[in-house]
Image: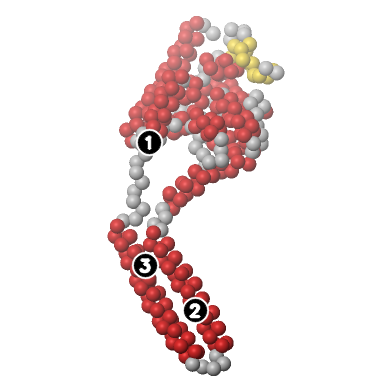
């Protein structure tokens, strides 16, 4: 290949890289204006690039991390009131009406009970009846106390917001996850959900951290589309960095990259060695695939 062709290929790759960077910048500006949550995953989706590309571009990676941290430091907006004053007034009024009815019924029962008790004293051999009335009186007192407690609880307990309750449960579920794991997930832009929390809590912290390291290696090779789902599988199957799953990810990426590199006449052949995949260039040199991928990213081919 002549120097002119090589220069043309490099120029084309540079133009594609520049366009990718411009898309990311525009996406960031748009997300900031619209108040969207900024993370590596959301920016990658908005700019139509891969998360691996964002992690490799140091300037873009630093800017995304800065914007993400700034969003987290902003004070959260206050939660809207759970219920309006009008709805609370209606609820309190209803409870008070029920309270009045209960009190009236209890007063009536008390008068009946007192009248029966007075008659018992004038009746001979009415010990059994008196005992039954005492038992009934005790039950009525217990019911009265229960009614009072129910009225009191109904008056002070606000209407629950399902979304707030769900968020509190989610936070309670993630409280058992170590801060080290949380920080690692946050640096990768991975949001905790019930499925991932369950997988993390079912494994030891050592397995979880090892799976996270494997995910980082896979991301650096551009072989991960959904980091959260990838990590769940890695934890459940106890994946480790530099394991079979890493080789599989590299092979998957190479399978996509190789035919395009051949078409661009960047390489002539390839082979798999114990040190990984090697490519044979037009300069008659064997260069590791990982180095070629850095020089000629898949997005620029």
Outermost residue toward the left? 86
| Mark closer to the observer (3, 2) | 2
Q: Is residue 224 left or right of residue 82?
A: right
Position of the N terminus by quadrant: top right
Crowding around mark 2 (Cα neighbors within 10 Å: few <14, some 14 to 19, many 20+) is some
SS for dot 3: helix
**Residue picked out by circle 2:** 137
- Picture residue at 64% right of the left edge, 38% below the top: 203
Query: Marks 3/1: CA distance?
Result: 43 Å
**Residue picked out by circle 1:** 36
**Residue picked out by circle 3:** 95
SS for dot 1: loop
- Whether 233 is drawn above or below 282: the answer is below
Task: Tell me, yes or no, if residue 14 can be seen here.
Answer: yes
What is the x, y in percent for residue 245?
A: 64, 29
What is the x, y in percent for residue 161?
A: 41, 53
Query: Marks 3/2: CA distance?
Result: 25 Å
Report the colour scheme.
secondary structure
- Picture residue at 43% right of the left edge, 19% below the top: 59
């Amino acid at each position: 290949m002549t120097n002119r062709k090589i220069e043309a290929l490099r120029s084309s790759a540079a133009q594609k890289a520049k366009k990718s960077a411009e898309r990311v910048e525009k996406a960031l500006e748009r997300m900031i204006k619209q108040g969207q949550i900024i993370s590596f995953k959301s920016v990658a989706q908005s700019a139509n690039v891969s998360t691996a590309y964002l992690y490799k571009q140091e300037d873009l990676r630093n800017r995304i991390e800065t914007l993400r941290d700034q969003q987290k430091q902003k004070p959260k907006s206050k939660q809207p009131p759970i219920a309006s004053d009008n709805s609370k007034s209606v609820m309190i009024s209803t409870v008070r009406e029920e309270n009045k009815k209960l009190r009236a019924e209890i007063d009536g029962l008390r008068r009946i009970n007192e009248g029966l008790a007075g008659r018992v004293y004038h009746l001979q051999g009415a010990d059994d009846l008196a005992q039954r009335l005492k038992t009934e009186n005790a039950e009525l007192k217990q019911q009265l106390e229960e009614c009072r407690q129910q009225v009191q609880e109904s008056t002070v307990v606000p209407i629950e917001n399902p979304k707030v309750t769900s968020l509190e449960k989610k936070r309670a579920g993630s409280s058992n996850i170590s801060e080290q794991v949380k920080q690692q997930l946050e640096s990768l832009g991975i949001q905790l959900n019930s499925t991932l929390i369950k997988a993390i809590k079912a494994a030891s912290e050592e397995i979880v951290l090892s799976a996270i390291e494997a995910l980082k290696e896979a991301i650096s090779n551009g072989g991960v589309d959904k980091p959260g789902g990838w990590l769940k599988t890695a934890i459940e199957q106890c994946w480790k960095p530099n394991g079979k799953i890493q080789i599989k990810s590299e092979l998957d990426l190479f399978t996509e990259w190789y035919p395009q590199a051949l078409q661009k006449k960047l390489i002539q052949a390839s082979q798999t060695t114990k040190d990984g995949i090697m490519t044979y260039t037009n300069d008659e040199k064997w260069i590791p695939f990982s180095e070629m991928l850095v020089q000629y990213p898949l997005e620029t081919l």
